[in-house]
Amino acid sequence: MKSPDRADDTGGKTAAGPIGNYRWVICALLFFCTTINYVDRNSLSVLKTTLQGALGWDDVDYGTITTAFTFAYAMFPSVIGVVIDKVGVKKALAWALIVWSIAAAAHGLVATVIGFVIVRFILGFAEAANFPASIKAVAMWFPQKERALATGIFNSGTSIGVMVSFLVVWIAGHWGWQMSFVFIGVIGLIWLYFWQKYFSAPEDQPRVRPEEVAYIRSDQPAPQQSLKLPWTTLIRYREIWPFLIGKLITDPVWWFYLFWLPSYLERERGQNPLNAGLWVAVIYTGSTVGSVLGGWISSTLIKRGWPVGKARMTAMGLAAIFMPGSIFAYYADSFAACVAFITLATACHQAWSANLFTNATDTFPQKVSGSVVGLGATAGGIGGMFMTLLAGLVVQWTGEQQIVFVWAGAMHLIALALFWIWFKGRIVQIDIDRPLDVSRAHGGLAIAGGIVALAGIALGLLVAMNWDYLKVAVKITGAVQSSVVAGAVLAIGLALFYASRARKNVAA
């Protein structure tokens, strides 16, 4: 039986009266920011055919340009996450949005491959702040039992952003592709006004009732001071690795659909650019539903008394088992069946993603959540960088995307198995205030770093030995991209080895 002064599971009211729902205003702000973020980044893919015709790009040129975005998106989130923890969500996200809006508009001012590489790199750098900041904001504004639902709702902005991106094609058709980029840069600055006016910490927001603040804090500690914890220490926590590896191998599936789906529908399914954009909108309508539903499932289970780990694993498991629909999509003779299977796959990925993001705040406290999610975004961006390179090279080499569709159908099941082996259904937040002993070298990181570094060296030698062949098969840009992949693998190995070294213990 409920006590008369305790909030019920909906958070809407108590026996003593309503507690308020201002936290959902914050969720709406994050939703619209994420939508704008994805309109900006997806504009290039929906205009791919137009730009190839106007500027003479081939698939490898396009792969090079998209790699510039994913490279920046991979390299900077871990740095930006630390900045977010240091200066706060409000300032960090505002600064990031100004930079990425200017970069988006600047696409209309360039006409060469190198020009697009530069503006896409700046766009990727700034947009890397969106998810670390948004996840930290959700941790600030929502109790644990509502976080997955709130994450699912704001994360659905990724799908909405892709859905409305076909309007960019319409704008390009009426006023030219340059003006379409300028338009999408302007809309971000409009959002900034509302962000500055309505966002703050719950305790500092005069529009929030004390009862709602109490509800938000009902299953979480009081607001915490930020903690400077270097990435070299964070990756020594074993609890972070399922999150990082999960992002590494499943985020690229979303990147693949994001950057290559419109051209797949045009090239291999015979749709014109506008029709392809409309079908993309249909597909991402399903992914919007998946994002919200995935968050709702685990949040509802927690409210009904399920342990957090069991609830998250159930929602992630339901999403993962349907991801092989991606494979059936490629082999389906019927276009309707193809669209249905791709819709199922994108919906399941978003349901998975809503719970994977929330895992970061399940296992690590709010004061380091920006850094943790930043590392996860870096891992996902690294995977995405490899995916865009792989997709570009495969399409240039074979003329089809069969290999990538098969790969996309298997990754979530592998990640799910990893989560189960690692956590066995039990997720508990670690005590970050009890510092790890870093005075001794970490053997596991050293071994992993050595193996990855050797793989990078072997791949580099393979590229060098077959350089002339690569230049013929995938042109000079494709050969250079292969070298970049080898160098990136080597760099990751060296980074892991560097993190394994013994250092002086510092009090938290």
Image (tube, rainbow, N blue to C red):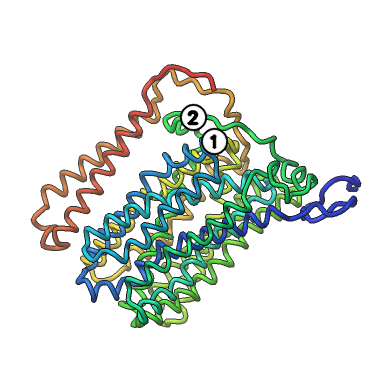
Check if mark 2's residue and mark 1's residue have beta carbons within 8 Å.
Answer: yes
Secondary structure of the residue carrying tag 1 is: helix
- Where residue 39 appears, x then y in whole percent? 44, 65
Q: Nearer the viewer, residue 213 or 392?
A: 213
The residue under the point 18% across, 44% down is 460
Q: Nearer the N terminus, badge 2 or badge 1? A: 2
- Where residue 194 appears, x then y in whole percent? 58, 57
- Direction from residue 20 to residue 247 in the image, left or right: left
Secondary structure of the residue carrying tag 2 is: loop
Q: Nearer the viewer, residue 228 or 334?
A: 228
- Where residue 201 appears, x then y in whole percent? 65, 43
Q: Which mark is residue 368?
A: 1
Q: Does 154 appear above or below 143?
A: below
Report the quarter where the C terminus lies: top right
Q: How busy is the neighbourhood of tag 1: few (under 14 within 10 Å), some, or many (20 plus)?
A: many
Q: Amino acid at mark 2?
A: Leu
Q: Amino acid at mark 1?
A: Val
The residue under the point 53% across, 67% down is 287
Q: Nearer the viewer, residue 286 or 506?
A: 506
- Direction from residue 379 to residue 237 in the image, left or right: right
Q: Quadrant of residue 392?
A: bottom left
The residue under the point 63% across, 46% down is 200
Q: Which mark is residue 229?
A: 2
- Where residue 275 appears, x then y in whole percent? 41, 82
Q: Nearer the viewer, residue 459 or 234?
A: 234
- Direction from residue 292 to residue 229 in the image, left or right: left
